[in-house]
Amino acid sequence: MCMNENDVRDLKKAVRLLENPSIGAKIAGIVGISIEKSIALLPNKATQAIDSAAQKAIYGALRLSLRTLEPHNPRLETEPPKASNGWHIAATAVTGAIGGAFGLLALTVELPISTTIMMRSIADVARSEGADLKDLQTQLECVQVLAFGGPTSNDDAAEIGYFVAREAMTKAVSEAAAHIAKSGLQKESAPAIVRLITKIADRYSISVTEKAGAQLVPALGAVGGALINTVFIDHFQDMARGHFTIRRLEKQYSHELVRQKYLEFKQLIA
């Protein structure tokens, strides 16, 4: 089966988005120092606080973020509404200004708010790609996007990429979907929910650590915090656009064909 010209163009764009530099590299370009140096500014106890804040933020986002968007039924012949990225970027910039002004102490307050806004933005992008937000799998994949922070210094650059990161969480997403379909989110301590949240939080906390370190760079303050949060949400909007483009194409063609073409295009931009 061959892909048509428009879909090939969309797939190439998705590859460029998903295989882009990590969020840490993007933030480093804003603050003017390496991400390793900015992370070194964090207090010794910061890692535990960030990990805890990331897990709580994802739990909260899972419960709240999708409730304020009207779902689009992909079976209808109407065009899905366009994503309102600008509103979400502006809202996240405000929370980033708070984090920049008050430092690490504000993280436990700022992160759940900015994460929830980002989750709504991710869902908005998913809907604009024709995804059905009533579908539980789609809802969980919106949360999964938070794990796509880009390659880190701990990753094997030859192996880690979008499909590797996604496939590492496939089983956890499926098990969580089965549990929620049966029992809802009342039992948040259920092993299936905990496994999924932990897998996502492990990678999301890397991005949050890079963001928190950059916000502590001297002289950045509230303005710098707002700018960093703008980069933060813009990155995850790109990840959402790339991911849900891939999912749309997989439904239209096949997972195998899209994956094969993706890897071919990835080699061309390497």
Image (cartoon, rainbow, N blue to C red):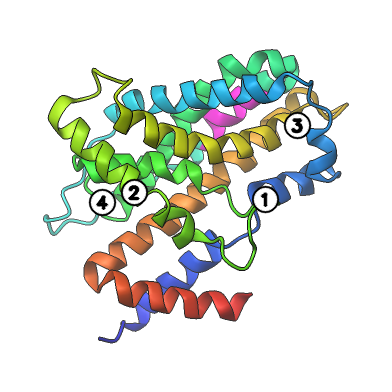
Is 211 or 83 nearer to us in this picture?
211
Nearest-to-viewer mark from 2 and 3: 3
For the point 55% across and 66% down, the residue is 16
Image location (x, y in percent) of residue 185? 25, 23
Residue 9 placement, left or right of 18: left
Nearest-to-viewer mark from 1 and 3: 1
Numbered range of the magenta stretch: 89-97
Quarter of the figure with the N terminus: bottom left
Determine contact: label 2, label 4, CB under 8 Å: yes
Crowding at dot 4, Cα within 10 Å, few <14 / some 14-19 / many 20+, comes out as many
* Label ID, residue 213: 3
Q: What secondary structure is the magenta-colored segment mainly?
A: helix
Element type where label 2 sits in the image:
helix
Image location (x, y in percent) of residue 2? 29, 86
Q: Which of the marked residues, 4 or 1, is nearer the chain's N terminus?
A: 4
Question: Mark 2 highlights which residue?
Answer: 126
Element type where label 3 sits in the image:
helix
* Label ID, residue 131: 4
Q: Check the image and report above or below for 264 versus 118.
A: below
Element type where label 4 sits in the image:
loop
Question: Mark 1 highlights which residue?
Answer: 154
Is 16 or 172 nearer to us in this picture?
172
Q: Which of the marked residues, 2 or 4, is nearer the chain's N terminus?
A: 2
